[in-house]
């Protein structure tokens, strides 16, 4: 009888002390410092937030870096990737979005020699606006560009847009203010033009950042896990630590 009780007690101890098996969430992202980057501390502010949320739920995060268009393509077409980040929320039929993983101030970079005054986007019809191919900006801006009301010039990176604005080849380009600050201080190719770059005084919006999950079983599972993890961490503090605010 004592032996049986001992076996039962030992079995119960094993059950209560055996940890839940950790799963690995693998997601693609891009080099978009200070939010994400291979060589950044903790791979960037957004990666640090997502990793903290995933680990708070007892799981692990693995991040792979690709060009932006490839990042989005992988989640929509490769079942091994449940989601990608950081992304702005937008209307779509094949993605679902996490709760916010931070925010980023989105606006226009301009040349210090040519500051531009505007109140509404319709005031910018005479200007060519630089955008990054594949990026979501704001619904209004993207719609005005799509229907031809606003003229645009697209490139593959923020750095290219900053070079063009710095050399006065275009008057404005859409950029996150934190990205501009980081690239001005750390991107060698901008050394000659960085002093000519400044944020336009009027922001478009302080955009919330999200994880975009595939709208399938895996994406729904991981969105639920991550959202629960986000409630357990201090997102604002993690962002401040990595953005130097």
Image (tube, rainbow, N blue to C red):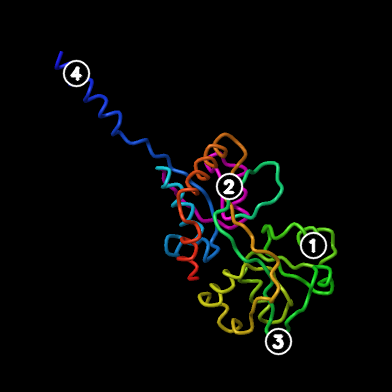
* Residue 123 position in % (x across, y down): 83, 72
Which residue is label 3 attached to?
Answer: 113
Nearest to the eye among marks 2 and 4: give it.
4
Q: Which mark is residue 192?
A: none
Pick whichever, 95 or 89, lies toward us: 89
Residue 192 colored in magenta in the image: no
Q: Which badge, 1 or 3, comes first in the chain's sequence?
A: 3
Q: Which badge, 2 or 4, comes first in the chain's sequence?
A: 4
In the figure, is residue 127 to the left or right of 97? right
Q: Which badge, 2 or 1, comes first in the chain's sequence?
A: 2
Residue at 69% x, 76% y is 200
Which residue is label 2 attached to?
Answer: 98
Q: Quadrant of residue 87?
A: bottom right
| Secondary element at image label 2 | loop
Q: Residues within 10 Å of mark 4 (few under 14, many from 20)?
A: few
Which residue is label 1 attached to?
Answer: 145
* Residue 243 position in % (x across, y down): 50, 68
- From this view, report whether residue 76 is shown above or below residue 139: above
* Residue 113 position in % (x across, y down): 70, 86
Residue 85 colored in magenta in the image: yes
Which residue is label 4 attached to?
Answer: 5
Start and end of the magenta stretch? Answer: 59-86
Disc 2 + disc 1, Cβ < 8 Å: no
Q: Residues within 10 Å of mark 1 (few under 14, many from 20)?
A: some
- Looking at this rendering, what residue extends furthest in the bottom direction? 113
* Residue 22 position in % (x across, y down): 39, 39
| Secondary element at image label 1 | helix
Q: Quadrant of residue 111?
A: bottom right
- From this view, report whether residue 23 is shown above or below residue 165: above
In the figure, is residue 12 to the left or right of 139? left
């Amino acid at each position: 009888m004592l032996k049986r009780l001992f076996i039962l007690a030992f079995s119960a101890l094993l059950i209560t002390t055996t940890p839940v098996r950790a799963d690995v969430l693998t997601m693609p992202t891009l080099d978009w410092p200070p939010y994400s980057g291979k060589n950044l501390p903790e791979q960037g502010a957004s990666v640090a937030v997502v990793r903290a949320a995933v680990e708070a739920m007892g799981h692990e995060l693995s991040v792979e870096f690709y060009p932006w268009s490839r990042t989005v393509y992988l989640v929509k077409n490769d079942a091994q990737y449940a989601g990608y980040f950081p992304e702005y929320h937008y209307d779509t039929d094949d993605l679902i979005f996490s709760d916010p993983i931070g925010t980023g101030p989105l606006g226009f970079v301009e040349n210090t020699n040519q500051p531009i005054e505007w109140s509404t986007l319709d005031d910018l019809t005479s200007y060519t606006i630089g955008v990054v191919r594949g990026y979501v900006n704001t619904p209004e801006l993207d719609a005005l560009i799509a229907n031809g009301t606003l003229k645009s010039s697209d490139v593959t990176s923020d750095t290219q847009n900053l070079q063009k604005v710095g050399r006065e080849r275009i008057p404005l380009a859409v950029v996150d203010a934190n990205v501009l600050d980081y690239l001005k201080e750390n991107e060698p190719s901008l050394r000659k033009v960085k002093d000519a770059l400044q944020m336009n005084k009027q922001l478009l919006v302080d955009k919330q950042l999200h994880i975009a999950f595939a709208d399938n079983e895996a994406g729904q599972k991981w969105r639920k896990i991550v959202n629960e993890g986000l409630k357990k961490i201090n997102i604002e503090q993690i962002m401040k630590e990595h953005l130097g605010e």
